[in-house]
Image (tube, helix red, strand yellow):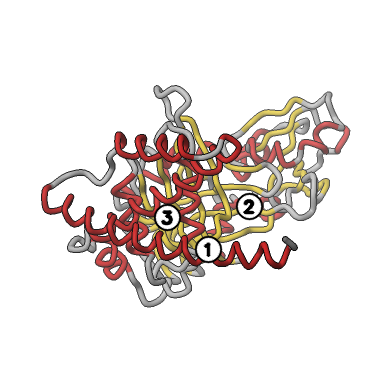
Amino acid sequence: MDRETLRKRIDQIDEELIKLLEERLDIARAIGVEKAEKGLPILDMARERDVLNRAAEKAQSVNETYVKLVFSAILAASKNAQTHVYYKDEATWEARIAKAKRDAFPTRADVACQGTEGAYSQQACDKLFPMARILYCNTFEGVFKAVEAGLCRYGILPIENSLAGSVTAVYDLMKKHKFYVVRSVRLKIDHALLLPRGAKFSDIREIVSHEQAISQCSEFLGQHPEWKVTRYENTAAAARYVSQSGRKDIAAIASRRCAALYDLHIERENVQNQSDNYTRFLCIAKDMEIYPGANKISLMLTLPHVPGALFQLMAKVAAMGMNVTKLESRPIPGRDFEFLFYFDIDADITAPGMAAFLEEITRELETCQMLGAYAELP
């Protein structure tokens, strides 16, 4: 048979498959209703194992792997269908989303930032809040704690850089604290080499800066192996230290703004590895707040330590027509080869089916926290 004839036969088979699949899903929903009435769990691992084994045994050996893959997706779809009828009277996510909606993002607020005046976190804060009252914290964890304790309504935290990658210290703190992302912003980062007044480039023996800035300027620093490189808690704090040190042989890598703030001389500009250097900052709050234009959703979750677990979740995301823009994994302390996953998804949380999707995965997974639905400023 020629290709067109074969394709027509495939189309006929697809139509038959759709009818059979719809019949199977209807039966799965009926079983879901019975499970709900009898208080039985949706997941039945023994039943799933039997279905997969039987499918593999009936398939030709050349197709066994493909058949198991397809039936795994069918079983996942069946569980999804059961979930929607199982929890039909518990629309908790619809209520939570409705309660979290706000009219307009505020311009004035109390905001916690890590560092001191001139820090990049402060510049990100200025971009989000034109009239912010800033509480400076020594550490990233201090920002989380200030928001949790109600000292500030919002907190600003760097989450990733286009050159140095993810800020892993912030990701590791996420699992320790309760918070929601309400907005994010991208900030152009231009690092400068700052010297005390009267000092010369040839005087430099030590460089101080934050570890992210040091990583972003690795090529420039690599040209001067004679320099001692010292990590500081923040670029602005490093600039202030250089200003107050009384030394002529020390320099800071920080922003141009820090030069004016701490009376330092700009010896070199744009010492980062690449000119297109951006850092993404999250704005967090104690409670979930959803503002108009929110088009991004962040999730933090664990997956069962079984083959195909991540694939099944990604299949659900794809079925919703959503695009995953970031996937970060961090090891779970004390649990060998198990990871906490962080997802950023381009999606409207008010779109049809989103509440049901969140209902399903938060009930199905051992750990699943919706970190926020928000918009990102360029």
How far apart are the alpha carbons under marks 3 and 1? 47 Å
Q: Which of marks 1 and 3 precedes in the sequence? A: 1
- Judged from the image, the secondary structure of the residue bearing numbered disc 1 is helix
**Could you tell me if residue 303 is visible in this image?**
no
Residue 349 placed where, x, y %? 41, 66
Residue 237 placed where, x, y %? 59, 41
- Judged from the image, the secondary structure of the residue bearing numbered disc 3 is strand
* Residue depicted at 63% across the width and 52% down the height: 279
Q: Name the residue under label 2.
A: 279
* Residue depicted at 58% across the width and 66% down the height: 11
Front position among marks 3 and 1: 1
Report crowding for label 3: few under 14, some 14 to 19, many 20 or more residues within 10 A (C-alpha): many
Residue 174 placed where, x, y %? 42, 42
Front position among marks 1 and 2: 1
Q: Which of 373 and 159 is in front in this view?
A: 373
Q: Nearer the viewer, residue 295 or 12?
A: 12
Q: Which of marks 3 and 2 precedes in the sequence? A: 2
Report crowding for label 1: few under 14, some 14 to 19, many 20 or more residues within 10 A (C-alpha): few
Q: Name the residue under label 1.
A: 14
Instruction: Identify the image quadrant of the N terminus.
Output: bottom right
* Residue depicted at 59% across the width and 54% down the height: 280
Type of amino acid under label 2: Thr
Using the image, determine if residue 260 lies above or below residue 4: above
Q: Mark 3 points at which residue?
A: 284
Q: Residue furthest left?
A: 38
Type of amino acid under label 3: Ile
Report crowding for label 2: few under 14, some 14 to 19, many 20 or more residues within 10 A (C-alpha): many
- Proximity of marks 3 and 1: CB atoms separated by less than 8 Å: no
- Proximity of marks 1 and 2: CB atoms separated by less than 8 Å: no
Residue 5 as seen in the image, left or right of residue 293: right
Type of amino acid under label 1: Asp
